[in-house]
Amino acid sequence: MWRSLLFLLCTSLVAQPLDLMLLEQYRDQDIRGWVMSEKLDGVRGYWNGKQLLSRQGYPLSAPDYFTQSFPPFAIDGELFSERGKFEEIAATVRSASPKGWYKLKLYVFDVPQAQGDLFARLKTLADYLAQNPTPYIHIIPQIPVKDDAHLKQFFEQIQAAGGEGVVVRNPHSPYIHGRSAQILKLKAVADAECEVVAHHQGKGKYQGKLGAISCRNEQGIFRIGSGFKDKDRENPPPIGAIITYKYRGLTASGKPRFATYWRIRSDYNLELK
């Protein structure tokens, strides 16, 4: 217990959000000449050449055996084990214990500081791994998109297998810090993130529990009142927490339509656990 508290105290003092590449929503853009891959439902992991960090800059407690053969240069990816295991993955990553890391790999989608296009950047890592093999790094295959029908077929295949969605990106683009129209996510239901700014008490069967939350994103403040499980209403996401919500389209003012709560972003909220 004390080890976990000390770990969280230390990370909260040094963490600085990382300026990483972030995805925009796919909206029928022209993607000829682009590549696609499965969007993995894990936790972002950024290896800076010396240390494994979360998206918010928190040092992750990966055991030495996990990172001992990692490269001396930066790689960006997703800590992942298998589909449908997000809660287990998040619990492992949040914990100060090394337990469970043997199930994970860092699935790499870019090498931020390498030269050339996406394929050249990933080859930099592949060449390193050929000389320094490790079971804990996997380069995500990038499949050239033939046309819209090819993308749709791949997306339906991923959905049928229980996957989260698909990432499409321009392989000729450099690694871009922040959100970019050069890398997009395609999902059956759109999702985004917001900061919890208020709790609202429930009524009727939710009397004495959470009824709804108010959230803030780039467009302003809006309310989310659905999607919560009973345990969420009894122990709601804290004020200041970053959550992920699902929605179906936007209003004329840019607010999400039919927003529903999904989960706390574990890599944003290490200090809250």
Image (cartoon, grey):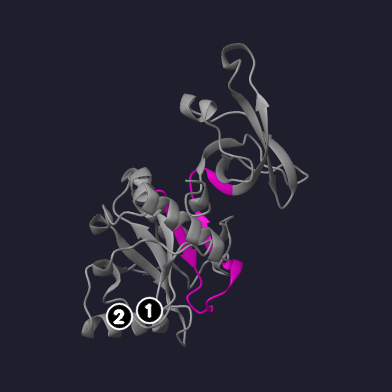
Name the image quarter holding residue 224: top right
Q: Which residues are magenta?
A: 164-192
Q: Is residue 176 above or below residue 106?
A: below
Residue 41 in sight from this viewpoint: no
Residue at x-position 60% and y-position 18%: 208
Which residue position is annotated with label 1? 122
Which residue position is annotated with label 2? 126
Q: Position of residue 251 (x, y in %)?
A: 73, 41
Residue at x-position 57% and y-position 12%: 205
Q: Position of residue 110 (x, y in %)?
A: 43, 73
Q: Residues within 10 Å of mark 1 (few under 14, many from 20)?
A: many
Name the image quarter holding residue 28: bottom right
Question: What is the CA distance from the residue labelled 2 to the residue labelled 1?
Answer: 6 Å
Q: Is residue 81 above or below residue 141?
A: above
In the image, residue 57 lies in the stretch drawn in magenta: no
In the image, residue 183 lies in the stretch drawn in magenta: yes
Residue at x-position 26% and y-position 52%: 100
Q: Amino acid at mark 2?
A: Ala
Outermost residue to the top: 204
- Between 219 and 3, the one nearer to me in the picture: 3
Q: Is residue 170 above or below residue 160?
A: below
Q: Are marks 2 and 1 in contact (CB under 8 Å)?
A: yes
